[in-house]
Image (cartoon, rainbow, N blue to C red):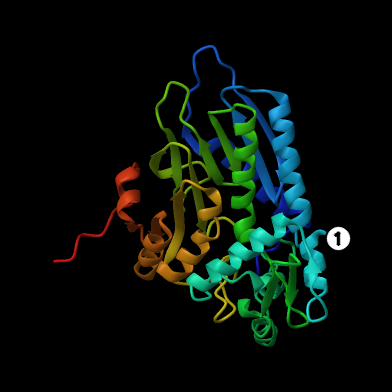
């Protein structure tokens, strides 16, 4: 039996969780004595986004940053009629569509991740995402024939990018792009660029859990960012990573899901069988100097698992932490050095003999 969901409850609950994430993701944030931070929270990119400035805290800096976020959202949303991505999807199988530099860059990055991950990350997952309806009132386990039909429309090789015309073409009718896995990383880097142009050196950009810790804390010490405990409420960490001028991005089974017949169905899809990835992982966190290099990579590393994922993380030059359902931690060498485990339930496996 599927858990009943009241109309609108999913969006309200998710938005509330994101508000909690914005408030609690920073485990320890210190301000310079006498300096008042300036914070704003708005809904964009399908989540609650917060920007907190700790120096050069001006309204114009926040105005420009949020205007950029809303502009990116308006171009890349698959749920907004008339967006550029909506136009690309609507023209699938018929004609290429010219897009802005923003959309072209994000789709191009998504296809690069598809290539290097062997298709484990695939932005043409749109038909499957829509079919499952996770994070909507229509979430349910689809019938087998629906899954089979959606899988036939998923293949990143069938996306044609024309750099000269700056256009995108989906070869087959019914195909659709979903760049939610990479758009927030692009947007976070754009916000950092804008804040830097206003002289900001210390800030926290939190796009629904996709965090960029800009500079260092007032006083010069690193920011301390919590790695979410997947079994606990939002804001309860299993450990802390200390970073400066770095993105910390996490994807986990606890973020967006529904329950049916006592089983959790989360939003990270396996494009090989049409079901949520089921490999014993609870979350993956990626740490990288650029948010665009971290976002999307979390999904690829989640799908690959720690053994194959470690090789990909090294190839991409990012640090990563895998958390399993049974509370084991796997990490790249750099990530293990920066992680302080605060919950003794979570441990690294013993080294092989």
- Can residue 199 be seen here? yes
On screen, residue 122 above or below 255: below
Q: Position of residue 264 (x, y in %)?
A: 55, 66
Q: Position of residue 321 (x, y in %)?
A: 39, 55
- Can residue 324 be seen here? no
Query: Which image quadrant is residue 96 in?
Result: bottom right
Q: Position of residue 277 (x, y in %)?
A: 51, 71
Residue sitting at the far top = 34
Residue sitting at the far front = 164
Q: Residue, x 67% and y 74% (percent of image)?
A: 128
Q: Residue, x 71% and y 59% (percent of image)?
A: 103
Query: Which image quadrant is residue 21 in?
Result: top right
Circle 1: element type: loop
Question: Left or right of 15: which side holds 185?
Answer: left
User: In terms of depth relative to the viewer, which is nearer, 25 or 124?
Assistant: 124
On screen, residue 40 above or below 301: above
Question: Left or right of 197: which side holds 348?
Answer: left
Q: Residue, x 56% and y 81% (percent of image)?
A: 273
On-image quarter of the N terminus: bottom right
Residue sitting at the far left = 353
Q: Position of residue 340 (x, y in %)?
A: 33, 42
Q: Residues within 10 Å of mark 1 (few under 14, many from 20)?
A: some
Residue that carries the numbered disc 1 in the rendered image: 82
User: In terms of depth relative to the viewer, which is nearer, 146 or 304?
Assistant: 304
On-image quarter of the C terminus: bottom left
- Numbered label tally: 1
Q: Residue, x 64% and y 82% (percent of image)?
A: 151
């Amino acid at each position: 039996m599927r858990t009943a969901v009241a109309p609108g409850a999913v969006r309200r609950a998710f938005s509330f969780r994101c508000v909690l994430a914005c408030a609690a993701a920073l485990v320890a944030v210190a301000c310079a004595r006498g300096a008042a931070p300036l914070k704003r929270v708005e809904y964009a990119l399908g989540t609650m986004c917060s920007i907190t400035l700790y120096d050069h805290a001006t309204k114009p800096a926040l105005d420009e940053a949020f205007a950029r976020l809303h502009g990116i959202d308006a171009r890349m949303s698959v749920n907004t009629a008339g967006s550029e991505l909506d136009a690309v999807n609507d023209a699938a199988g018929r004609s290429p569509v010219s897009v802005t530099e923003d959309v072209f860059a994000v789709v191009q990055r998504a296809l690069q991740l598809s290539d290097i991950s062997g298709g484990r990350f695939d932005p043409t997952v749109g038909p499957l995402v829509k079919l499952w309806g996770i994070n909507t009132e229509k979430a349910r386990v689809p019938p087998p024939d629906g899954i089979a039909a959606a899988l036939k429309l998923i293949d990143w090789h069938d996306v044609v990018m024309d750099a000269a015309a700056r256009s995108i073409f989906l070869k087959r009718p019914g195909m659709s792009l979903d760049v939610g896995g990479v758009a927030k990383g692009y947007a976070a880097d754009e916000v950092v660029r804008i804040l830097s142009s206003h002289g900001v050196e210390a800030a926290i950009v939190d796009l629904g859990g996709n965090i960029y810790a800009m500079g260092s804390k007032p006083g010069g010490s690193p920011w301390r960012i919590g790695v979410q405990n997947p079994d606990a409420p939002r804001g309860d960490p299993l450990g802390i990573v200390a970073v400066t001028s770095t993105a910390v991005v996490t994807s986990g089974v606890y973020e967006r899901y529904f329950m049916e017949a006592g089983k959790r169905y989360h939003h990270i899809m396996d494009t090989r069988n049409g079901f949520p990835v089921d490999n014993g992982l609870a979350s993956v966190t990626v740490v990288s100097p650029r948010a665009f290099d971290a976002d999307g990579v979390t999904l690829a590393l989640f799908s690959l698992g720690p053994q194959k994922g470690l090789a990909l993380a090294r190839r991409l030059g990012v640090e990563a932490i895998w958390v399993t359902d049974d509370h084991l931690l796997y990490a790249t060498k750099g990530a293990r050095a920066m992680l302080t485990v605060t919950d003794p339930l979570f441990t690294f496996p013993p080294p092989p003999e």
